[in-house]
Structures are given as C-alpha cells and as structure tokens.
Amino acid sequence: MPGLASSCRSARVSSTIKMAARARISASMLPGSGASIRRISSVAGFSPVTPSSTRSTVLHSQQKRFMPKICPNTPGRKHIDGVNFATCDPETMSGDKPAVTQNLVAGEWETNPAELIAMPDPLNGEPFIMQPCVREEGLDVYIKSLKSCPKFGLHNALFRPERYVLMGKVSQRAAERLEDPEVEHFFARLIQRVCPKSYAQAVAEVRVTRQFLYNFSGDQVRFLARSFGTPGDHAGQTTEGHRWPYGAVVIIAPFNFPLEIPALQLMGALYMGNKPLLKACSRVAIVMDQFLRLLHECGLPKADVDFINTWGSTMGTLLKKAEPRQTQFTGSTKVAEMLTEILKGKIKIEGGGFDWKLLGPDVPTNPQLFDLVAVQCDQDAYACSGQKCSAMSFLIMHENYNKAGLLEKLKALALKRNLMENLTVGPTLSVKPEHIKAHIESILTIPGSKILWGGHEINDGNHTIPECYGASAPTAIFVPLSEMMKDQEKFKIATKEIFAPFYVVTEYKDEDLPQVLDVLENIDEHLTAAIVSNSACFQNEVLANSLNGTTYVGLRARTTGAPQNHWFGPAGDPRAAGIGTAEAIRYTWSCHREIIHDIGMPPEDGVYEIPEQS
C-alpha cells in the first residue's frame, strides 16, 4: 500500500544507506545482548552518508561548522546511568555508534538482523539508527498475537476488572519516572535527535505525556469505564450502559510528535481494555521503543502491547489479514482515506489540517498584548518547523492589524529562528525541497500574491541536512482574498496544506466578513482554529458559522500547543478521533454496550401477566 509511505515509511536515502540496510548484524549488537553495539560502518563496506550534491562544497570533515549545537540552552550533558530501561544514548547515537530499535511481539523483544535498515540523522545524513523492517513473510506472529485477544478485550467491567487498578498504578509509576529530571532529559534529547525541534518543544512533549499519566493514575482508569443505569418497566428489570473495549486494535502514529501522540493513544487503548499493536513512524520509532521499556519497568505486562516496524505496504497487508476491531490513525488525510477503505470504516482518524487564524477588528491597545498576538502567530506557524497538524496554515488578518504593523513584527520574529543556535527551525521530514519550491511557485501564479519573507533554504543552503528532507526557511506568502475566491482552482492552490514552516496571509475589511466565512466553509479540513478577538459579537458570528473541532477564542487564541487537559481532534467527520481527555479516550477506544437485566421478580399479587401472542 504505497500511500502509507507518508506516515509509515522512512525516507529513501542514498545507496550507501541501502547497502547498510542489507547488512547482516550479529546478535551481540542488539539491545540486551550484554555487549555494546559494534561499528556498523565495518559491515558490508558501509560508510556514512555525505551531504547532498547541492551542498557538496561542504566537506564531511567540516560538517560541524554547519550543524546546530547539540543541546542549546539546556542543562549540561547528562549520562543515562539512572535511566535503567534505556538501550540507547541520544547523546552518542551516530554513524560510529548507531542505536538499534527492536520489535515487540507476544511479550518478547526481537530483531531479525537480516531485516535491519539504516535511518539517516536528519541533521547530517549519518545512519545513526538501525531499524528493523518486518517483511510480509514475518507478519504471521503479529497477526496471531492480535487474534489471541478476544473481542471482549483484555479486561472489561465484568472480566478481570482488577486490571483497571493495574493500569492506574502503571500510569502513576510512569508519570513519576518522567518526573525524574534525568528521564525527562533523556526523552527530550531523544525526540530532538530523531525529529529536530527546539529543546522547549521537545521537553513539552515529555511534560504533557507525564501530566496525562498523572491524570489517569489511581482510580481514574476505572472511572473511564463508569456505567449508568435506567429503571425498567416492571420489578426485576433494569438496564445498564457500559463502555466496552474493542479487543485487538492498531495504532498508526506520525513522526512529528514521537512520544506524545503514540503514548497518549496507546495508554487510552490500554485503559479501556484493548490489546494494541503500535506502528510508529520508522523515522522516530526508537522513542516509543524506549517508552515501552519504561512502561514495562513500571509494571505493564509485556504481552499487552505489540510493537512493529515495517514498510507501509507491509502494514497494509497486516491490516487486511489481522482485521483489527478498531484502528486509530494520525497522519495525512490521503492515507486516512485509503485506510478507511481497507478497514471498511473501522477507523478513527486525526488527519491533516489547513488550520486558520482569524484576527478580528479589535486590535489590542496594550503593546504587550499586541506583542503576544504576534508571538503566538509566529509560534503557531513555525514551532517544530511547521510540522504540526495544528500549525497555523492560514492567517486572515483584519486591515487594522496591518495598519498597526503586525506584518513587520511577524517578519522580525521569523528571521530570528535559527538552526544553528536553538533548532527553532530545522529539517522537514515529510516534505522535500522540490515540493516546497513547487508549492511556492504555484501560489505565486495567483494575481497579487507575493512572498512576504522566506522562500529560500535555511542559511541559504549552508547546512548538512540531507537531501531526502526539506530545509525551508520560515516563509509567508500574501494572497489577496478576492483573487483566492475567484475560482476553485486558485482556492485549492492557496489552501493546500504543506507540512513545513509556511503559511498564507490574507487581509479583509469589515464588509468582507461574509466572504471570509465563505472561505472557512470551503476549507476541507476542520481540526484547529483561532478567533483572535475579545468582541463577543464577532466571536459568536464566526463560531456560529464554522466547525473546527478544537477552536481557541480570545486575544490570546492559538492553533497549536494543545495540552492534556482538553479535547484535541477534528470535527465534521464521524471517523474523527480524540486525544487527551476522558471523553476522547471513551469515544476513541470503547464502544457502548447495553445490558438489560430482567430476573422475573414475582408481582405483588403473585400472578404473572402472560401477554397475548402478537
């Protein structure tokens, strides 16, 4: 199933990496073997990847000149001695000392050395992780493990209810482990290594995950399965509504949040009594490899979760053969549609989003509040290099903001973002340079459009990001509202989502609000949105005529940065998945079951009324 590549397949890399992919690696190189990993560069004539041809002037020996600081603006170097579960060190992973990811099935960690492929470091192209890639002939054990779970799950309200208590204990212990500064730092750095983003963004993932685990500690897991009752028609009859697990389920997680998204969905599935098979994006799967080891240390039974690393097409075969009762997919809308067909609708999705921010006419007069609006726009668009499904893709600006100098502030903020100092901009792992360039060129065909800033590579190409990944500087393009709406083709071009540090800006006047609402109605994706206004009338007008699933309202409204204390997910689609809250867990990971009790209590007069045949 080739379309799964955008979420599930590692980038195609140079022939040297493909050579390493075929290298056979001895068992002594694998985690838990009792021996350190040997240099993979000695296997099969392997050598590290050099910078791309467009950057060939940068010699491999000089790469450090163009690489960001290892851990900018963070505590000093920490060792992983206290991180007992760890099988890798994010500080030393490299072409000389690659880490190794493993699969987990039926309670056993495993790696077939013949199936290992090399994953390139997104900052310099070195093959710094050896990743298993299960082939179709190796799927049977995963299918068997999934099918071993009954349809009524590993636990439910009537079967092994003590497991609700167990899951609460696992959550609490895992949260406490993530409270440890050394463990927190370990995961933050590991996230940075596989999905380069600022340390603040990486550590925020760890902290959101930790707070989520605290939220569902103790009895909170069993409260998720709380039932309700209704009186019946006669004595001895009552009805109860329960939340029931699906049983065997699959989670397919994206690259952009290597810990937060898969961890929250995984734990939600476990809480409700399901047995999940987790497929993380190959580029970042080592993060969940390590998180699963932490959960095992905290008491999670090893057989509760299977973890597979494979190509997208092979994963499609697994889904067809295993027929999971529910699949939760986070990734591109295109792949979500393909999976919906394969799985016959048994899917919950959190797909792409062309997320908009609408700036109302009431520009804040307080300079600090005005600056906060500008900083939040910059953060929503460019944090994690724009690689968030909630990233601001479309800024709809009232003319009052333009007159107040917002664009100048936004440009200054964008130009401050830096690869070398703090990773506030970095590689885009799913969008290649040529795709970004083509997208910009297509938008510039719309009359009146212009580049406001950006439109070129980071540092004008002076970096070591490999060619298989994009390296776009923060970019914004202005498109006139009237031109955008002239025909469907221009509208599709202007409102196409691109997973990169990029957004479209337009401007409107008071009398243009109906046209703006038409624009919002015609956007296909309805994930997040922001209405930046404190005017109650303006807020109501826009809210009443839109439907984004997670909508922020007020002068400090944002599109990104969803914490664990509110629902996050799209609206307007019966397949929409939620994440983060009790409601999201129940909705995504359980179904309703009604149990009607009718025990035939004797009537007060002792005579049962026998109904006539009908």
Image: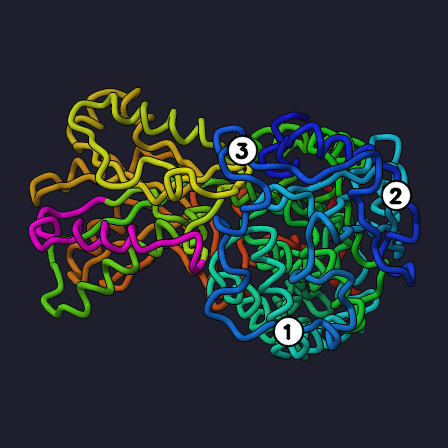
* Residue occupying image coordinates x 45% and y 40%: 471
Q: Is residue 280 left or right of residue 330?
A: right
Residue type at numbered disc 2:
Ile
- Residue at the disc numbered 2: 25
Q: Which residues are magenta?
A: 396-422
Find out whether the residues at labels 1 and 3 contact each other: C-beta distance under 8 Å: no
Disc number at residue 152?
Answer: none
Q: Mark 2 and mark 3: span between their CA atoms?
A: 27 Å
In the rendered image, which quarter is residue 378 located in? bottom left
Q: Earlier in the sequence, mark 1 or mark 3?
A: 1
Q: Mark 1 and mark 3: span between their CA atoms?
A: 31 Å
- Residue at the disc numbered 3: 467
- Residue at the disc numbered 1: 78
Q: Is residue 139 left or right of residue 589?
A: right
- What element does badge 1 sit on? loop
Residue type at numbered disc 1:
Lys
